[in-house]
Amino acid sequence: MIKVLLIDDDSVGSLAIKIGLEVDNAFEIKWLKNPIDGLQLSLSGDWDIILLDVNMSSLNGFELLRQFRVRDSNTPIIMITVRSKESDILMGLNLGADDYLCKPFSLKILKARVSAMTRRFQQKSRQILYNEVTLDLESKKLIYKAKSYRLNIKEFNLLKIFFLEPNRVHTRDLLLDRLWGFDSDINDRTVDTLVTRLRRSLKKIGIDLEIKTIRGVGYTLNE
């Protein structure tokens, strides 16, 4: 199943895309209207492809794309927008979009482009390297000194967040949202427990990474 993140504040059009893609049972769609929430989730989830609008209120899609590409150069992105000028298309592609589809478009065309692009990208190795540690996003394994290790999936995803944005202070609320979802009723003590488990797992492997506690706020990975 292809995991799609749709970031678009057009309720009518986005709902049609979501329903249309889910009909075939080949797509799993997460739709967010708020682009700021979309940026956060795009960096934390393991998405096969992202569909991104341009004209959104709180964060322009081009700016979201720019910020995303600083941290993730692998995940394919298709811009879906009414902005059809050549300058807009060139801007999107130059900022790192892999395809640009102007509204209105055929749902069949969208399905074909998503399927074709994910086929190409799934053939590539998707890894995140931080110092001497590699996270393989396909196998969900940690690689260190030519040996691979299996972390708990939550530990793996938490380490991925830290690797993508080292030196950033990640609040407990933000980590809750990224790891358990925006509508989760899990409290922030669960985050503390997860960080403790991750530290122990890394220490057991022999990896020396400083995940620092920012009292009353959250955590950061010190470079």
Image (cartoon, rainbow, N blue to C red):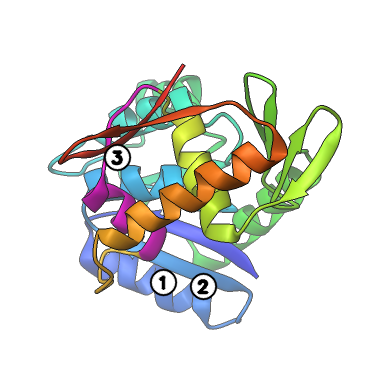
Residue 128 in the image: x percent, y percent? Answer: 63, 32
Predominant SS along the magenta part: helix
Q: CA distance from mark 1 to mark 2?
A: 5 Å
Residue 61 in the image: x percent, y percent? Answer: 30, 37
Q: What residue would you read off at disc 3?
A: 54
The relative height of residue 197 versus residue 208 in the rendered view (above or below) is: below
Label 3 Cα neighbours within 10 Å, binned few <14 / some 14-19 / many ≥20: many
Earlier sequence position, callout 1 versus callout 3: 1
Earlier sequence position, callout 2 versus callout 3: 2
The circle drawn on residue 18 is 1
Q: Can the viewer see residue 165?
A: yes
Q: What residue would you read off at disc 2?
A: 21
Q: Residue at x 46, y 68 (%)?
A: 29
The relative height of residue 101 versus residue 110 in the rendered view (above or below) is: above
Task: Tell me, yes or no, whether the two marked residues, 1 and 2, touch with CB atoms within 8 Å.
Answer: yes
Q: Quadrant of residue 1?
A: bottom right
- Could you tell me the amino acid type at mark 1? Lys
Residue 149 in the image: x percent, y percent? Answer: 76, 47
Query: Which is more toward the observer, 77 or 137?
Result: 137
